[in-house]
Image (cartoon, grey):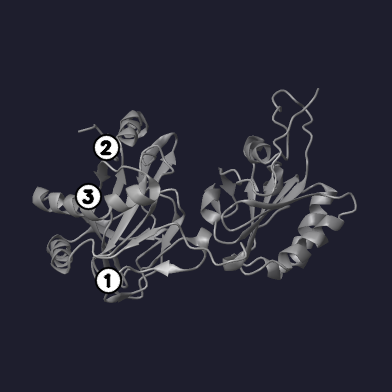
């Protein structure tokens, strides 16, 4: 039988996936951007070559710290876990359990054709990714195992994460002052203070449905949903006049729809934060095109928006100022360490995305609620 493999090369984007991991039963690989990543396709850790590779990783433990470099071993042999052949070591060293060979197939470690095959050929290899999750280098296992030492020397010589491209990168975001005037910012803060907020979650796919999840380790924020139509209209008018033209100019995208009218509050007393995530990775959020984050106050520390794939720089707009960015970008909100950060946090999209949003109604859990175009 002849086999065909996916053949990735340097410069290609690394395929995204979700898979069980030693640290998370449903690990979203797209969230690891912002550092160098080493994927090691072991086949099985019972293999002598795989054991030698893992020993080399252990011997160079100092390289893997989750700040500069993270290591992920990928095993398609689920007995590696039950027999204890692979073990997580944090920070920096984790393992994926590749049920059905899905991940290995995506990266060309096993062939596309595996159905009905009793002995699947395995191409054991190392893959190094840059902080934007693009392939930098692919190194097949050598029979004598010398490639592992070569890889470790390569990792040790890599430049600092924020200079991986040879220059400091600027995250592709819009930074716009004067979207909301001071009095309007104060009005929205007062509205939150008058009504209080409710703990805010995030969306995740569970058994084919988009459901709302709360996890204070991942996100801690309280939100108030604006119900006053006059205030909703006022937010729409300002965003239409002051943000929509900039999105059209920079991205050639015409915004026609807006979702979510909330005042969010990250507080120091709660350790308010939002770990790295993307805003459009579920059926219930796939229609979102741009996120808008408008600060309403300045008297807080922390709570800044960052884009790990493009370096450590973080953004704190002045009161009434906005950061506008594609919902596909990996982003995070750092922990608030003093005071409270108030922000207006909508999403915008267009008519085509509105149709997609309605088409995805069957995939929404009851708690999320369906959508109908106005």
Kindly state the secondary structure of the residue where label 2 is placed: loop
Name which of mark 1 and mark 2 comes first in the sequence. Answer: 1
Q: Image height check: is 359 above or below 349? A: above
Name which of mark 1 and mark 3 comes first in the sequence. Answer: 3
Residue 264 drawn at (x, y percent): 26, 60
Residue 106 drawn at (x, y percent): 64, 38
The Cα–Cα distance between marks 1 and 2, rounded to whole angstroms, is 30 Å
Residue bearing the label numbered 2: 369
- Is residue 232 left or right of 362 when viewed as pictured? left
Residue bearing the label numbered 1: 340
Of residues 16 and 199, the one nearer the viewer is 16
Please state which of the two labelled residues, at mark 3 or mark 2, is closer to the viewer.
3
Does residue 127 appear anywhere in the picture?
yes
Kindly state the secondary structure of the residue where label 1 is placed: strand
Please state which of the two labelled residues, at mark 1 or mark 3, is closer to the viewer.
3
Residue 123 drawn at (x, y percent): 78, 41
At 10% from the left edge and 48% from the top edge, which residue is drawn? 229
Image-quadrant location for residue 352: top left
Does residue 201 appear anywhere in the picture?
no
Residue 65 drawn at (x, y percent): 62, 67
At 19% from the left edge and 55% from the top edge, which residue is drawn? 238
Kindly state the secondary structure of the residue where label 3 is placed: helix
**Quarter of the image with the C terminus in it:** top left
Q: Image height check: is 262 above or below 107? A: below
CB contact under 8 Å: marks 3 and 2: no
Of residues 80 and 256, the one nearer the viewer is 256
């Amino acid at each position: 039988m002849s086999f065909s493999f996916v053949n990735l090369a340097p410069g290609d984007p690394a395929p995204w996936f979700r898979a069980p991991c030693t640290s998370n039963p449903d690990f979203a690989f797209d969230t690891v951007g912002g550092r160098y990543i080493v994927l090691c396709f072991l086949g099985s850790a019972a293999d002598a070559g795989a054991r030698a590779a893992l020993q080399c990783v252990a011997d160079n433990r100092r390289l893997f710290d989750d700040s500069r470099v993270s290591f992920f071993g990928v095993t398609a042999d689920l007995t590696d876990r039950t027999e204890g052949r692979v073990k997580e070591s944090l920070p920096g060293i984790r393992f994926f359990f590749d049920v059905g060979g899905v991940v290995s197939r995506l990266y060309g470690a096993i062939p596309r054709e595996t159905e009905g095959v009793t002995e699947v050929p395995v191409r054991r290899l190392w893959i190094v990714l840059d902080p934007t999750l693009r392939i930098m280098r692919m190194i097949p296992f050598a029979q004598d195992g010398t490639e592992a030492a070569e890889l470790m020397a390569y990792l040790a010589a890599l430049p600092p994460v924020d200079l991986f491209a040879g220059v400091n990168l600027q995250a592709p975001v819009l930074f716009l002052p004067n979207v909301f005037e001071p009095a309007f910012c104060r009005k929205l803060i007062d509205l939150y203070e008058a009504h209080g907020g409710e703990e805010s979650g995030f969306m995740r796919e569970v058994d084919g449905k988009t459901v709302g999840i709360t996890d204070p380790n991942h996100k801690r924020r309280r939100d108030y949903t604006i119900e006053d139509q006059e205030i909703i209209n006022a937010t729409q008018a300002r965003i239409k006049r002051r943000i929509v033209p900039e999105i059209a100019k920079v991205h050639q995208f015409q915004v026609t729809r807006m979702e979510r009218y909330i005042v969010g509050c990250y507080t120091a007393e709660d350790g308010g934060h939002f770990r790295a995530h993307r805003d459009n990775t579920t059926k219930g959020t796939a229609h979102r095109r741009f996120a808008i984050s408008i600060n309403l106050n300045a008297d807080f520390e922390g709570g800044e928006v960052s884009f790990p794939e493009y370096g450590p720089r973080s953004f704190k707009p002045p009161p009434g100022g906005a950061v506008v960015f594609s919902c596909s970008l990996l982003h995070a909100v750092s922990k608030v360490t003093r005071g409270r950060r108030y922000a207006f946090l909508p999403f915008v999209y267009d008519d085509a995305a509105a149709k997609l949003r309605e088409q995805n109604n069957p995939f929404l859990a009851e708690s999320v609620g369906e959508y109908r175009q106005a």
